[in-house]
Image (cartoon, rainbow, N blue to C red):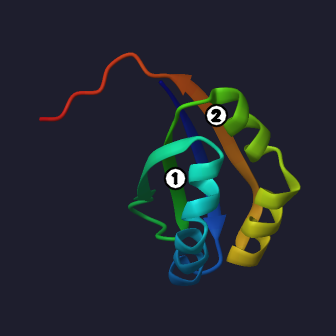
Amino acid sequence: MASMFIKHRVADFDAWKKVFDEHETTRRQESMTAHSLHRDTDDPNLVTIAFRVSDLARARAFAESDNLREIMQRAGVEGPPDIWYTEDIEDKTY
């Protein structure tokens, strides 16, 4: 399993979240199996999303797609996102 992380600033978190929620089906089709959302403690419009992905190549292609750029623009993402990938080696809940 792998993870994809996206960090970006949004104009308005609530407006962004509505668009984000509308695209769950698209994310599922592009190999994302789960996510967690995180907001910066000092800036609530700085958002990090951690996605679990079943197919890293498909997730990378989606991250580079015009479709995702259009969704982000409509959601009010400001500036280019910071996107990175990791290979999951341990997942433990306390």
Query: What is the spatial separation of the Cα atoms under label 2 and label 1, in whole angstroms?
Result: 11 Å
* Residue 19 x, y percent position in the rendering: 61, 76
Q: Give the labeled residue for mark 2.
A: 84
Q: Give the labeled residue for mark 1.
A: 48
Q: Could you tell me which residue is drawn at 32 percent across and 19 percent down?
A: 90
Question: What type is the residue that disc 2 sits on?
Answer: Trp
Q: Could you tell me which residue is drawn at 44 percent across and 50 percent down?
A: 35
Instruction: Label 2, secondary structure: give it.
Output: strand
Q: Could you tell me which residue is drawn at 49 percent across and 67 percent down?
A: 43
Between 63 and 81, the one nearer to me in the picture? 63
* Residue 72 x, y percent position in the rendering: 73, 66
Say which quarter of the image contains residue 54. Answer: top right
Between 23 and 45, the one nearer to me in the picture? 23
Question: What type is the residue that disc 1 sits on?
Answer: Thr
* Residue 60 x, y percent position in the rendering: 73, 35
Using the image, determine if residue 28 lies above or below residue 89: below
Q: Which mark is residue 93?
A: none
Using the image, determine if residue 5 lies above or below residue 87: below
Mark 1, residues whose alpha carbon is within 10 Å: few (<14), some, or many (≥20)?
Answer: some
* N-terminal-most mark, 2 or 1: 1
